Image (cartoon, helix red, strand yellow):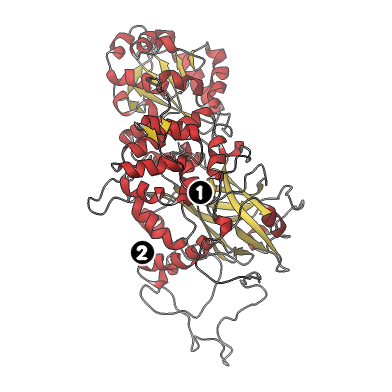
């Protein structure tokens, strides 16, 4: 599954950094795209999942690809990243193995778009370096509410190189303007049933309505001295530099304002390659990045069938360019004239420009050339633990529940036991919770660790979605369940207040088409109750009437609409006439600060402002069934 909107990137003046206080990036990079603030550069973005094939449902628990092609004046820059800043492996040669392990098992070709099966967890349990990534993938980061509410990362450490050939290390971050938001697992499962194209539809609707998705490009800049003094190797793709240690600085904006004119011509044929960088951006010696630089061209040659895939409009640079390549399958343009080589004495054809062209940073490397894992890459658990302790209590519960669910689908006991032994090196309470829910009678010993887990790493609030939530309802969607006899003035006031928050409303009715309001006007609905469950919305409101509520209570889908919204910790506003439906949904005894009787028209703005919290996490423990028994004992 993939979806690719187009738009533009613009460089903006830079704020203070740990190194200096520049107003542009010229001091760090000669890349043309960063030389003039406010200049718009065309861009194309592809969002994707890994485990699922084309057409699979959108809300799989999975890492999301976040690949950006920026058509700069010096050629294309492909920042091929993910919504998670680390990766499963350190050695690029293991890339096919991790993909093979997570894809459908070869003898049966299922499960589709799921990691909850033996082969994936077998590989992971035998690959300790994956443990940091596993914490991210088992967190709510792996089930985003929308691509618009999702971060992106370049994953690796790159280099900026300035006009003096001076190098500065850089890590790239895309920060969504509307903040981070994910869904609950139960919610994800139901969204996949109600609308398997949920993420794709969300992009289309937001762009077509003019609510263009937007991200801020931020960079972490640091020098060799910082790298040498940091607790972990900055070339290790399974590690991050916490934002509290080195704050990212904003340097530009990415705005998506157009969907593809033709999905095949653009989304299917776009070719991203990490080695596509303009002068002024270079690579570090991260071994996984170096492997990606070699492998991506191979991929595109096989996928698109010709070395001339760069002639396709979606892949061709927008700037003038010249070279001596010619002919071959799918060649759409060829050089003219007698000469197709360099050097030549006919004074024909393009010439290399050593000063303005691309050149590598002349790094000095020492040591023995060998294929091995450096000792500086050997700590596989400390940052995994740091990620876990940085989460709020609800987020930690979700990680434990995700691990339990995934491992419950693993049929081989030894694999489950190996995974719990790794969890013991991350957090003993987490390991005990998972083991107890999986029915372990005794705990295994902790996995052998090349480096003991550090206990001194401080929590990083930036790693928590809840801690970095949006605090506003902008860009979200309110679902309003209406019936005949609804209060027209209340509906008008509510929709106006939602519009003022730059959010949208969608109406759900028991019948196809809509309902007749109390003043006799006909209100068009967007959904019939059967096709508009509450999982499609970020909050819900019940606008009913005393005359219609008895019939609505008989609707199983209406009861589910309310019960699901409550279970998923959403805000619920209601007209007093809806109380019989609330009682039928079984939540009348649990009404809390997130279940709100709607005030009069004047008080609706206050009600809507509360929706910015998005979830009432304090409700979650009350909707969980059963209590955990005593932790099992370790062997």
Residue 60: image x %, image y %? 37, 41
State the mark number for residue 235.
none
Residue 462: image x %, image y %? 60, 38
Q: Is residue 135 rendered to the left or right of residue 187?
A: right
Examine the rendered structure and indicate whether residue 473 appears above or below residue 14.
Answer: above
Residue 9: image x %, image y %? 58, 52
**Secondary element at tag 2:** helix
State the mark number for residue 449.
1
Q: Are marks 1 and 2 in contact (CB under 8 Å)?
A: no
Q: Nearer the viewer, residue 253 or 556?
A: 556
State the mark number for residue 303.
2
Examine the rendered structure and indicate whether residue 299 appears above or below residue 329.
Answer: above
Examine the rendered structure and indicate whether residue 335 appears above or below residue 462.
Answer: below
Residue depicted at x 46% and y 30%: 397
Q: Nearer the viewer, mark 1 or mark 2?
A: 1
Which quadrant is the C terminus positioned in?
A: top left
Q: Is residue 603 visible?
A: yes
Residue 590: image x %, image y %? 44, 12
Give neighbour class at mark 2: few <14, some 14-19, many 20+ (Cα, 10 Å): few
Q: Nearer the viewer, residue 496 or 580?
A: 580
Give neighbour class at mark 1: few <14, some 14-19, many 20+ (Cα, 10 Å): some
Within the image, what quadrant is residue 197 found in?
top left
Residue depicted at x 63% and y 61%: 159
**Secondary element at tag 1:** loop
Within the image, what quadrant is residue 332 found in?
bottom left
Pointer 1 or 2: first along the chain: 2
Q: CA distance from mark 1 to mark 2?
A: 40 Å
Q: Is residue 208 visible?
A: no
């Amino acid at each position: 599954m993939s979806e690719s909107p187009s738009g533009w990137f613009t460089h903006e003046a830079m704020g203070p950094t740990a190194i200096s206080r520049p107003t542009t990036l010229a001091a760090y990079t000669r890349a043309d795209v960063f030389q003039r603030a406010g200049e718009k550069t065309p861009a194309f973005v592809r969002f994707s999942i890994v485990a699922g094939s084309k057409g699979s449902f959108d809300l799989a628990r999975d890492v999301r690809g976040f690949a950006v092609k920026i058509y700069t004046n010096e050629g294309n820059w492909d920042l091929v990243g993910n919504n998670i800043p680390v990766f499963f492996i350190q050695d690029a040669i293991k890339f096919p193995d991790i993909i093979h392990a997570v894809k459908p098992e070869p003898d049966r070709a299922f499960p589709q778009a799921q990691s909850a099966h033996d082969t994936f967890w077998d590989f992971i349990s035998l690959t300790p370096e994956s443990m940091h990534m596993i914490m991210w993938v088992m967190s709510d980061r792996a089930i985003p509410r929308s691509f618009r509410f999702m971060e992106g990362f370049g994953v690796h450490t790159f280099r900026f190189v300035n006009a003096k050939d001076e190098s500065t290390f850089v890590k790239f971050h895309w920060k969504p303007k509307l903040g981070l938001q994910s869904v609950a697992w139960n919610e994800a499962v139901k969204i996949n049933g109600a609308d398997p194209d949920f993420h794709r539809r969300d992009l289309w609707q937001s762009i077509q309505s003019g609510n263009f998705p937007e991200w801020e490009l931020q960079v972490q800049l640091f020098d060799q001295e910082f790298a040498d003094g940091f607790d972990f190797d900055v070339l290790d793709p399974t590690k991050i530099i916490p934002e509290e240690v080195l704050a990212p600085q904003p340097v530009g904006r990415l705005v998506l304002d157009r969907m593809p004119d033709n999905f095949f011509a653009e989304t299917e044929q776009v070719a991203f390659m990490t080695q596509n960088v303009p002068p002024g951006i270079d690579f570090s010696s991260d071994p996984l990045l170096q492997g990606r630089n070699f492998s991506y061209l191979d991929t595109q040659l096989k996928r698109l069938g010709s070395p001339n895939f760069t002639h396709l409009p979606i892949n061709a640079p927008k700037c003038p360019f010249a070279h001596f390549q010619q002919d071959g399958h799918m060649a759409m343009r060829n050089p003219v004239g007698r000469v197709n080589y360099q050097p030549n004495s006919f004074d024909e054809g393009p010439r290399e420009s050593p000063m303005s062209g691309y050149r590598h940073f002349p790094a000095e490397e020492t040591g023995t050339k060998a294929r091995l894992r450096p000792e500086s890459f050997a700590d596989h658990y400390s940052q995994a633990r740091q990620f876990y302790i940085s989460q709020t209590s609800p987020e930690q519960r979700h990680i434990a529940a995700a691990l339990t669910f995934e491992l419950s689908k693993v049929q081989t006991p030894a694999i489950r036991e190996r995974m719990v032994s790794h969890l013991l090196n991350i957090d003993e309470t987490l390991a005990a919770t998972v083991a107890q829910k999986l029915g372990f009678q005794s705990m295994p010993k902790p996995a052998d660790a090349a480096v003991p887990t550090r206990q001194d790493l401080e929590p990083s609030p930036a790693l928590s979605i809840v801690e970095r939530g949006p605090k506003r309802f902008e860009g979200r969607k309110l679902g309003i369940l209406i019936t005949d006899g609804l209060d027209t003035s209340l509906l008008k006031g509510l929709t106006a207040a939602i519009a003022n928050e730059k959010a949208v409303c969608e109406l759900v009715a028991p019948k196809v088409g809509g309902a007749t309001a109390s003043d006799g006007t006909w209100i068009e609905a967007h959904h019939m109750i059967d096709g508009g469950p509450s999982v499609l919305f970020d909050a819900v409101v019940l606008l009913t009437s005393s005359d219609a509520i008895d019939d609505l209570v008989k609707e199983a889908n209406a009861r589910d609409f309310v019960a699901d919204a409550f279970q998923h910790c959403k805000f619920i506003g209601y007209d007093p006439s809806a109380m019989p439906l609330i009682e039928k949904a079984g939540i009348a005894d649990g009404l809390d600060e997130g279940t709100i009787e709607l005030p009069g028209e004047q008080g609706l703005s206050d009600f809507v402002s509360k929706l910015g919290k998005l979830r009432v996490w304090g409700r979650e423990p009350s909707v969980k069934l059963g209590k955990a028994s005593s932790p099992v004992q370790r062997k």
